[in-house]
Image: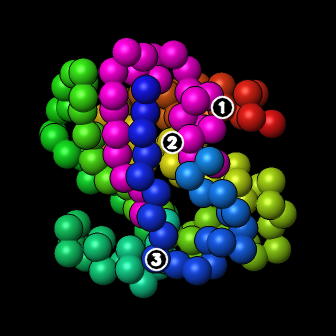
């Protein structure tokens, strides 16, 4: 079972996402079986933020002086999922998800789900530095996204 602690320091999220905790819980409940961690208690935090704050974090932790869509901070380099495991923190920037501003709510939510899945996989030690790792991560993202969309649409 997955528990997410959802926080927000950007008011704009409330305009597009009314029940944040419910929204992300529903996504995790729709994950494929291997990512549901049945009979275990896996938890992480999610901060819904903005470009200004994510830029600062990106600079402090990755030496990149620009905002990004998502940052993930795994609690351990190689997470060992045991009975109770905290896997880390995800931060998502509203400004990236809300581009273009003219997009409808369905597209906004799909983009948010994809970004969330990407951040979640980083917490599980997936990365995209090498091309073969990029392909592996992309395959997992697509698998999870298709499963989630088929269950919550």
Q: Which mark identifies residue 135?
A: none
Q: Residue drawn at (33%, 28%), measured in percent from left and top?
A: 41
In front of the other: 78 or 59: 78
Image depth: mark 1 or mark 3 in front: 3
Reading the image, the residue beneath label 2 is 117
The quadrant holding residue 75 is top left
Question: Residues in magenta?
Answer: 23-47
**Cα–Cα span, label 1 and label 3:** 26 Å
Q: Which of disc 2 and disc 3 is earlier in sequence?
A: 3
In front of the other: 80 or 86: 86
Q: Residue 12, image x and y in percent?
A: 63, 78
Q: Residue 21, image x and y in percent?
A: 56, 52
Label 1 crowd bin: few (<14), some (14–19), many (20+), radius 10 Å: many
Residue 27 drawn in magenta:
yes
Instruction: Please indicate whether residue 82 sits to the left or right of residue 129 in the image.
Output: left
Q: Is 90 drawn above or below residue 139 in the view shown?
A: below
Q: Are marks 1 and 2 in contact (CB under 8 Å)?
A: yes
Q: Is 106 drawn above or below residue 47 in the view shown?
A: above
Reading the image, the residue beneath label 3 is 9
In front of the other: 15 or 52: 15
Q: Which of disc 2 and disc 1 is earlier in sequence?
A: 2
Quadrant where the C terminus lies?
top right
**Cα–Cα span, label 3 and label 2:** 21 Å
Q: Which of disc 3 and disc 1 is earlier in sequence?
A: 3
Quadrant where the N terminus lies?
top left
Residue 142 drawn in magenta:
no
- Callout 2: SS: helix
Q: Is 70 drawn above or below residue 98 in the view shown?
A: above
Q: Residue 30, image x and y in percent?
A: 62, 28
Could one spot residue 134 in this view of the protein?
Answer: no
Reading the image, the residue beneath label 1 is 148
Q: Residue drawn at (42%, 84%), measured in percent from left and top?
A: 52
């Amino acid at each position: 079972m997955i528990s997410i602690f959802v926080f927000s320091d950007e008011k704009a999220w409330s305009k597009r996402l009314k029940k944040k905790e419910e929204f992300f819980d529903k996504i995790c409940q729709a994950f494929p079986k291997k990512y549901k961690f049945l009979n275990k208690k896996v938890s992480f935090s999610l901060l819904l933020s903005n470009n200004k704050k994510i830029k600062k974090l990106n600079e402090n932790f990755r030496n990149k002086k620009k905002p990004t869509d998502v940052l993930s901070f795994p609690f351990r380099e190689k997470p060992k999922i045991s009975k109770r495991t905290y896997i880390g923190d995800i931060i998502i920037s509203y400004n990236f998800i809300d581009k273009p501003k003219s997009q409808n709510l369905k597209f906004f939510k799909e983009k948010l789900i994809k970004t969330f899945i990407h951040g979640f996989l980083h917490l599980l030690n997936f990365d995209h530095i090498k091309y073969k790792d990029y392909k592996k991560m992309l395959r997992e993202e697509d698998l999870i996204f298709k499963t989630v969309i088929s269950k919550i649409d």
